[in-house]
Amino acid sequence: MTDRLGPDIDEILASHHALLKREIPRLSAAWKEIEAPKALTEPWLQLLAVLLPHLDKEEQILFPLCRAMDQGEAPVGCGVEAPIKQMDYEHDCITTLEGCLRNASVLAGKYEPDLLAMLDDLAVHARRESDDLFPRAVRRAHEIVAGTAPPVEDEAVAPPTRDFALPPGTRLVRDTRGRCNECLADVPARVVRDNAEARLEKLCPTHGITTQVMSHAPDSWERLDRFYFKVNADCYPQRDYIVRMTEKCNLDCPICLARANQADTPDLGIDQLRDLLSERRGIKVDLMAAEPTLREDLEDWIRAVKSRGGIAALHTNGLKLANRAYAEKIRAAGVDEVFLQFDGLDDNANKVLRGRPLNKARLAALENMRELGIATSLIVVIAKGVNEKEVSRVLRFAMEPRNSHVREVFFLGLRMLGNARHAVAEGEGLAASMLMPDEIIDLLTEQEPSIRRDDIENFNKLYFAMLSTFKVKKCLYVQHYMMVRDGEGGGKPISDFLDLHSLGEAADRYAEGFTDHPNFAKARLLASLARNGANFKTLGMLGDLARLERLFQTGMNLGEVPGRFLILGFITACDPNNFDAQVAVNCGKGEMSADGGFIESGAVANVLREARFDRDLGDKAT
């Protein structure tokens, strides 16, 4: 008989979670009523900063995975183990703060019994999960993967609804979990394809089926999707963290993912960064949020990252970096790379996306980066009907000799997050402007005929395989290609130098042998790369290709990328529409923020942030 997890989860939600969600707002209001001293309110606020995201992650990630295992579905990637490891760590933090609140409970006055009762329930909740539910979930996952799990009880499997039946001509690629586009609820989801497109479909009991088109090249998408999950069969440690320093900004972008300046969110403390660095040496830290250059102590943050052997990456709109003296201070602090918002050379597009013309300031910032020798990535948000033509234009601009410090161009599809999602909800015309990475690849191949889709597909198979050999997390929604500069303002795609078809076949062989013989598969892949990489066209760049390969192991520091190469990225941010739980498990970035706490998956952090935005808007409306 199957050891089902669902009944325990139902009981936890109905008892512990329900009590906490009832008592937390009641006691928070009580502290204001009695004007509780900081000795009580400070540990209370610290507890909520950990506990509320913890409850959300249980309900939106872990519990759905456990329910899927009740139905005999094997967890993909690292399955339940990564979120459980993180949640066990959070239990330790919660227990510490629980002790602080018990010591301060006498300050709660007439609410002391209520506070102690809530803390007692919280302690039982944590013990029950750590001692019983979590170990059973890990054991169940191992049994399913190993094929030793007992058969699923018939009554445990919910029959599929007729509304979610596959229509004629549609094929299932895989089942997963997603979020309803409307209410953000965790719902059953699937990736399907027909002859016209690949798409993610979600079934919400309230709002029915909602969809997200993934690609208009379904054959290519299906091949890459299946390949990706073959080579991400293990749980890899996170090596890259977004640190949201502030939610303030000096712009008011209509598409702002963070809804900057609209909530009274405190800045993140640098001590929280130091805590992260004390546990994880040599990681990449993305200093970002709304606009990190508004932090007067930004240089201290950069130095803190560098002191722990990390890569300091600054994400900015560039307005302050247009000032040479300020740019010099950032350089002196040791910044490794700058990710510069750069939505093309058309200021009319800037007005639509950012609310004002910005080219003058951004070009000045780019010139400062060049003169100071700071490796730069251009982050180009592409919105359908606004600036599609800028894909080729920015590529050619980045290839110019004066821009050899630009080592990367990231084409980022506009997504349903923050201001953009709110504008769509209000009936404004941004809904048709949303793009997925595969659609940007379509734009590139249309505008640059020398770049072919099949070459990009094979390049990404090689890319995902190389990441796998060095145990690096990476999202399916982050894909790449590469150009080789000729030093005269032009260049050629990497397919002119490497036999990407043969390397794609080598990557396929790696994927087939990875599970059973990982070391042999890795050795064979690297041998194929060396064999296909050495030819008369690449003789002058073998050293640079070897440097690129080392970066998979040491961390992708753009300052170490050889100047002859320009890396292209086709990416998206995870939003409620495209959220796929199996992809989110492998998110290549963790996140730390003042309002969301510490989360191992940036994809999950995005969805949780949208849920907070919705709650805040609902509270204001009432």
Image (cartoon, helix red, strand yellow):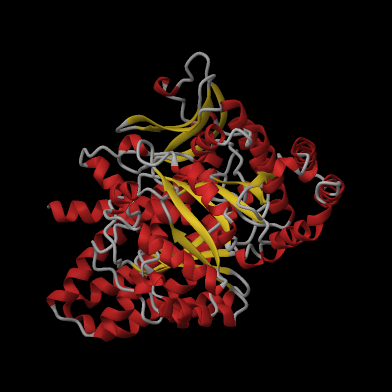
Q: Residue furthest front?
A: 488
Q: Position of residue 44 (x, y in %)?
A: 30, 75
Q: Quadrant of the N terminus?
A: top right
Work out whether residue 371 or residue 213 is closer to the camera in this orientation and state it.
371
Q: Position of residue 345 (x, y in %)?
A: 41, 50
Answer above or below: position of 332 versus 201.
below
Work out whether residue 70 or residue 197 is closer to the camera in this orientation and state it.
197
* Quarter of the image where one finds residue 326: bottom left
Q: Position of residue 464 (x, y in %)?
A: 67, 47
Residue 15 visible to an observer of this rendering: no
Answer above or below: position of 323 versus 430.
below
Left or right position of 452 against 423: right
Left or right position of 539 against 557: right
Left or right position of 558 against 98: right
Left or right position of 367 against 222: left
Residue drawn at 43 percent across, 61 percent down: 363
Work out whether residue 498 or residue 369 is closer to the camera in this orientation and state it.
369
* Quarter of the image where one finds residue 118: bottom left
Residue 238 visible to an observer of this rendering: yes
Q: Position of residue 3 (x, y in %)?
A: 57, 44
Q: Residue furthest top?
A: 168
Residue drawn at 15 percent across, 56 percent down: 620
Image mark count: 0
